[in-house]
Image (cartoon, rainbow, N blue to C red):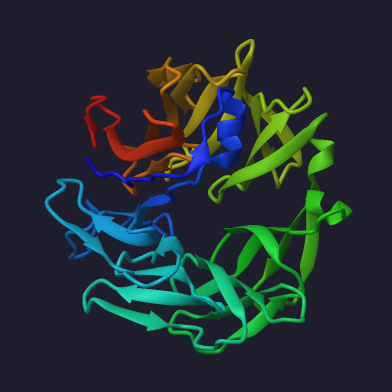
Amino acid sequence: MIKSCIYNTMLKHTHLIYRFYVIIFIVLAFISQGCKDNPSGPDGNINSNYEIAYHRWINNNWEIYLNSLSRNTSKNISNFSYEDSDCKWSPDGKSIVYTHFNNRAADIYLYNIKTNENINLTPDDTYISQAPVWSPDGKSILFSYHKVPESQCTYIMNYDGSNKRKLLDYEAKIYFFADCNNFLYKPVAVFDERENYIYKTNIDRTYNELILDLRTVAHDYATVFDFNTRDNKLLILASDEKDKPNFIITYDLTSKTIDTLIKAGEDHSISCPRYSHDFTKIALYEYTSDYKSMRLCLFDLKAKPLKYLLDIASSEEWLDFRPPVFSPNDKYLAYVKNTNQPGPWFTWKSSLYIMELSTGKIQY
C-alpha cells in the first residue's frame, strides 16, 4: 500500500465539516498527456518505468514520489529540506516540474526522468516562483511570481528556464490552455469583482478578453474546474443553494450557452469534477451534508446516467477533496482515500488507489 503516513497533530473533532477544512491534501498525477493528440504514458512512447507522481508526507516533510502501476518501483525525486509541491508531468512524459520551498523563497525545479537530475529553473533567493503549468507543446511554463515588496503576478518562461518575462500584472488562480498559444485564467482578486471573471489571453500579450462573468451562470456561486479544448467548453461546479455546490454545468465559449449535466441528489453535494482526456466522461465526488456518505462517481456524457464507482458510508473513512485523475489513456482513475487512526489526537493515513474503469479492479 502506498501511504503518505500523515500524522497531523490536530485535536479530534466530531464534526466532519471541520475535518474538511483541516485536511492536508495529497496531489497526484498520472503521466500527463499534454496536447490531446500526442499521448504518452503507459500506452505511449515514453521509456520510463514510472507512471504516477504524487506528494508524500515523510519525515516531517512533503516530498514528491514516482511510482509504477505495478508497484515494483518507487522513488523520491525531490528529497530536499522543506516543502516540495505542485508536481506536473511534461506533455512528453520525460520530466516533471514542481515547486520547492525553502526558508527564504521558493523556486521551480525540473526533474529529468532519464538523467535523474533536478534543475532549478528560477535560481534566485529574493523571490517566490511557484505553481508551474506546462503549455500543451511542452515549450513553455506558466508560473506565479512574487518579489517583495512588489505585488504577485504571472510569468512565463521556456521549458529550460530561459526567456523569463511577465505575462500578467497579477496572479491567476486557474490556468487552462486552449492551445499552445492561448490560455484561460481567473485572477486572484480578493474583494474585487475580477475574482468572478474568466479571461482569455495569449502568451504574446497581444490581447486580453473577458469571456465570462461566473455570477451570470449560478444563483449562489460557480467555480471552474476543467476545460474541454475540443468543444471549447468550461466545466463548472455551481450552486443554487448557499454553501452547497449541487450541480455541474458546461459553458460553451463559442455559442455562449449553458448546459446542466448533473444535479446532486437530495441532501447531497458535488465536489472536484474532472474531464477524462477524451472529454467523454467526468469523474466527481458526491457526498451528504454531514459527510458520513461519500461516493466516487463517473458520468458518461453519452450514456448520461451517473455511475457510482465507490460508496463509502463510514465515519472513519473519507475521500480526499482533490479531483480524481484519469490516466492519459482514460483506462484508469486515481484517487486518495483517508482512514482515521485511533488515539487522543486527530490523525489519519492516506492511501493512493488506482481503479481500472473497465473492470472496477482496484490497486493500492
Query: Which residue is rendered at x = 68% and y = 81% of the image?
Result: 147
Which residue is at the far top?
A: 266
Rendering quarter of residue 192: bottom right
Which residue is at the far left?
A: 72
Q: Is residue 64 visible?
A: yes
Say if 327 sits above or below 308 in the image.
below
Residue 36, how many percent across, how many down? 42, 54
Query: Which residue is rendered at x = 77% and y = 80% of the image?
Result: 150
Q: Is residue 322 visible?
A: no
Quadrant where the C terminus lies? top left
61 and 252: which one is in front? 61
Q: Is residue 3 left or right of residue 335?
A: left
48 and 3: which one is in front? 3
Rendering quarter of residue 347: top left
272 and 46: which one is in front? 272
Quadrant where the N terminus lies? top left
Residue 191, how many percent across, how many down? 87, 53
Q: Is residue 361 left or right of residue 211?
A: left
Which residue is at the far front?
A: 344
Number of on-image labels: 0
Residue 52, how many percent across, how many down? 29, 53
Q: Is residue 41 left or right of residue 29?
A: left
Say if 120 sits above or below 303 in the image.
below
Query: Which residue is rendered at x = 43% and y = 40% of the image?
Result: 276
Residue 225, how many percent across, how many down? 60, 44
